[in-house]
Image (cartoon, helix red, strand yellow):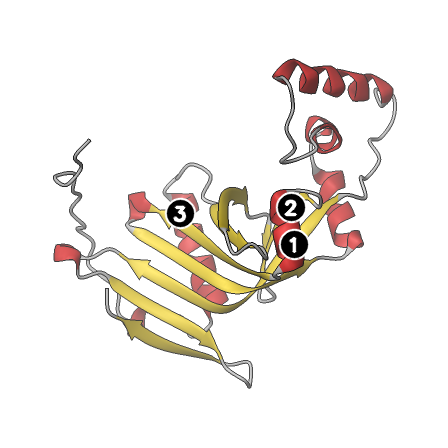
Amino acid sequence: MDLTNLRAKYTTRGLDIKDLNPNPFLQFELWFNQAMEAKLTEPNAFSLATVGTDMMPSIRTVLLKIFDETGFVFFTNYKSTKAKQIEENPKAAALFAWLDLERQIKVEGNIEKISTTQSLKYFLSRPKGSQIGAWVSHQSQVISSRSLLEQKFDEIRKKFVKGEVPFPDFWGGYIIKPTKIEFWQGGQDRLHDRFLYELQDDNSWSISRLAP
């Protein structure tokens, strides 16, 4: 299939450095709120890229659940492929693609587990079905059929039907602590606006304009 004629025009007014908050987390919060106001589908979904010792990049979509000036938090199974790669190489990249707004945000940095207390707090806030799902899925492992998953789900649901679902010790959160955050705004004639925040040794942030 030849896709060379598949093109989209970017019609926004662009982005200038004077429009940016000097704090990248506040700039992210501004854009995130605008994505929410635009009613984008799951604006907290982002692509997470990790690389293990085999040097083969792996990417998947996860959901942002917490962010502040410490970093960006998502939750997963600690025995998954992504978790094994993070253990081998604790660095990651994330991409929020809000194409309806002609925007992207790229985050690069170090990644580590959050505390058990923080993970437990979030786990208890989840619907019971999602709590059970965390127990059922041995993430990334080969399974014979979907019916097997459904059977395990039903078994665990019946086991904890009258009580709370216990917190699994193989499940929890990771935080990406960024060293770089790039804000990308689509522009006419492919003259996109890109601004890169980079963390300095004194914990301040520099801002540079990048060529599109």
Q: Earlier in the sequence, mark 1 or mark 2?
A: 2
Question: What amino acid type should be assigned to the residue bearing mark 1?
Answer: Tyr
Q: Position of residue 147 (x, y in %)?
A: 65, 13
151 relative to 139, above or below: above
Q: Position of residue 159 (x, y in %)?
A: 86, 20
Q: Position of residue 94 (x, y in %)?
A: 48, 55
In the picture of the structure, the residue carrying the numbered disc 2 is 75
- Based on the displayed image, in which of its 4 quarters is residue 68 positioned? bottom right
Question: What amino acid type should be assigned to the residue bearing mark 3?
Answer: Ala
**Between marks 1 and 3, how big is the CA–CA gap?**
23 Å
* Mark 1 surroundings: few (<14), some (14-19) or many (≥20) residues within 10 A: many
| Residue occupying the far bottom of the picture | 202
Q: Earlier in the sequence, mark 1 or mark 3?
A: 3
- Identify the element where label 1 is drawn: strand
Badge nearest the viewer, 1 or 3: 1
Residue 20 visible, this orientation: no
The one nearer the camera, 209 or 141, is 141
52 relative to 7, above or below: below
In the picture of the structure, the residue carrying the numbered disc 1 is 174
36 relative to 109, above or below: above
Q: Mark 1–mark 2 contact, CB under 8 Å? A: yes
In the picture of the structure, the residue carrying the numbered disc 3 is 35
| Residue occupying the far front of the picture | 54
- Identify the element where label 3 is drawn: helix
Question: What amino acid type should be assigned to the residue bearing mark 2?
Answer: Phe
Q: Position of residue 88 (x, y in %)?
A: 64, 58
- Based on the displayed image, in which of its 4 quarters is residue 21 positioned? bottom left
Badge nearest the viewer, 2 or 3: 2
Give the residue at x 65% y 24%.
143
